[in-house]
Amino acid sequence: MAVSSQPVPRVIGVDVSRPDPHSYFDDEQPRARHLELELDLDFDARRVVGRVTLVLEAAVPAIDPDGALPVLDLDTDGLEIEAVLGDGGERLGAVLDDADPVLGRRLRVDLAAGTSRVTIEYRAAADAIGLQWLSPEQTSGGVQPFVFSQFQAIHARSVVPLQDSPGARVTFEAALTVPESLVAVMGAGAGVAEPGPRAGTRTFRFEMPQAIPPYLISFAAGDLVSRELSERSRIWAEPSVVEAAAYEFAEVEAMMATAEGMFGAYDWDRYDLLVLPPSFPYGGMENPRLTFLTPTVIAGDRSLTDVIAHELAHSWTGNLITNANADHFWLNEGATTWAERRIVEALHGEEAVTLAWAIGEQGLADAFERFGVDSPFTRLRTDLGGGDPDAVYSIVPYEKGARFLVLLERAVGRERFDAFLRRYIERYRFSSITTEEFVAFLDQELPGVGGEVGAQEWLYEPGLPENAPRFESGRLEELIALGGGFGDGVRPSAEEVEGWSASELLVYLQRVPRPLAAEDCRWLDERFELMGRGNYELLVEWLTIAAASDYEPAFARIREVLVEVGRMKYVRPLFLAMGEHARTRELAREVYAAAAPGYHELSRRAARDVMAGYSAG
């Protein structure tokens, strides 16, 4: 390693309160505004050989007369730093601190007077958490390997040394070198391919002109092809998946037009989508210009395209305006869930969005049960104290945050609230803010409304306040009653369930009590043909009922789903449900042993955490 491990002299801009407890980023130090990134993707070693140049906002001024050194603190995690260079290629002094279990290792660079560019040559670790490398057997096509990035919340530092905080937004240009049989894509302007630096490789070059938080830097490489969805949208996927994906997401342009009518012009030029292999741990990731998607949303009937509405909405309420750090995550996901539901309502009607709120309500109740309703992790404005954001990731900031915005909307009326939202987006576009900044803007634009709805309780207290908005309809009440009455022998007839939408069936299944007797599980499966469902929301809800009921006929399907799919939304509840009985606990351990090699590390952690809580009996 070419960097020092010794202390450095007194420095400028250190030992102050950092703006982000999950980053060594110090906003009193020089700030990188642009990255020049070169990544050579070594599939054999499953490592990235990297070179990044951080272009500073301004050249470093002359050294302070008292001799203090200006420095630049960067985030790294598992990186091997080989060289740190200044503008002219001269080596700069650098210290790599001991590792913190959450933050990784701080790289402190000594800056000479006049420095405007810092170049770092490095290698990423083979187990970098920000990447998942897949063998051909783990892909849909089974022929070529695959790699994809996943940098949220604080994992960009495992692939690139940089100021890894949402408040340190950057533009970038990037060159990705891959085997010539593969295609590289990136959340940036369209890639241009050229011969690579070695035989058998090619390099794809990208530019990202809009400033984004580091966690939104994204790329993938594999056997990829594309289909056009509209003049400003295309879908990327493996050849065996792309046609089904193009059908599933054909209505994306209508969603974009609807969103623009509500939230203003789309500021990111294009909206492309990438369907990843099933090990992707999330439903979707809102990377600007290239939303990442799990293949589990391809149901064949467009019944799960609300995921697209959510990721698209991030283009305004998440990417355009971002939470300043993980303690303010609700500003990102709560606002986006609210915006998603507005899009769904506009496209599919009031009944559809009422069902969506009901489905989210059940998820919120499950999260409260997981943490405890009085847990600080059920607050919107959290204080993680630098703790691991992944460890407390949940639906709370999504659903509780969205309900808080609905409360504000109902307090002032939709027309007035929509005008407020437009001003909010215009005021903070391309910036990263705190809850306190949001509250100040709310008080300025809608005086007294925060106090009227109890904003302080909503934001800073755990649980769900008593004035939480309700979402009601006759149809919803009927479904809730039918599901809740299952334990008392209430059974809907074949005529009653004919024509039920996927959302209606999901609301019903969520309210069915568990555990059930084997004959009741059999009745459910036969009535609704659940075991063979291609809609994973329905399939996994059914399998959690079956697992919690120790229903052996479902064991093979549980195993199949968990081995094939690594989405955390499904992994956690299925492993949790299997903890209820001795046989299913044993099944869980067997399935995990088989499935874990194909899971993303985030999904492995989720499963391990659940199984660690299994009782000995």
Image: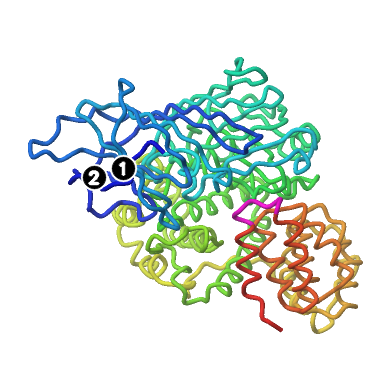
x, y (%) of residue 350? 64, 55
- The residue identified by callout 2 is 8
Q: Disc 1 vs disc 2: which is toward the camera?
A: 2
Depth check: 377 or 222 in front? 222
Give the left or right position of residue 119, taking residue 215 as reference: left
x, y (%) of residue 560? 82, 57
Depth check: 219 or 446 in front? 219
Q: Is residue 604 highlighted in magenta? A: no
Q: Is residue 598 highlighted in magenta? A: yes
Label 2: few (<14), some (14–19) or many (≥20) C-alpha neighbours in 10 Å? some
Residue, far top: 195
Q: Give the range drawn in magenta.
A: 597-603
Looking at numbered disc 1 in the image, what kind of residue is underneath it?
Arg
Please say if 223 is above or below 422.
Answer: above
Q: Quadrant of residue 500 in the image?
A: bottom right
Q: Name the residue rendered at 11%, 38% in the picture.
A: 67
Label 1: few (<14), some (14–19) or many (≥20) C-alpha neighbours in 10 Å? many
- The residue identified by callout 1 is 108
| Quarter containing the C terminus | bottom right
Please report contact status of discs 1 and 2: CB closer than 8 Å, yes or no. yes
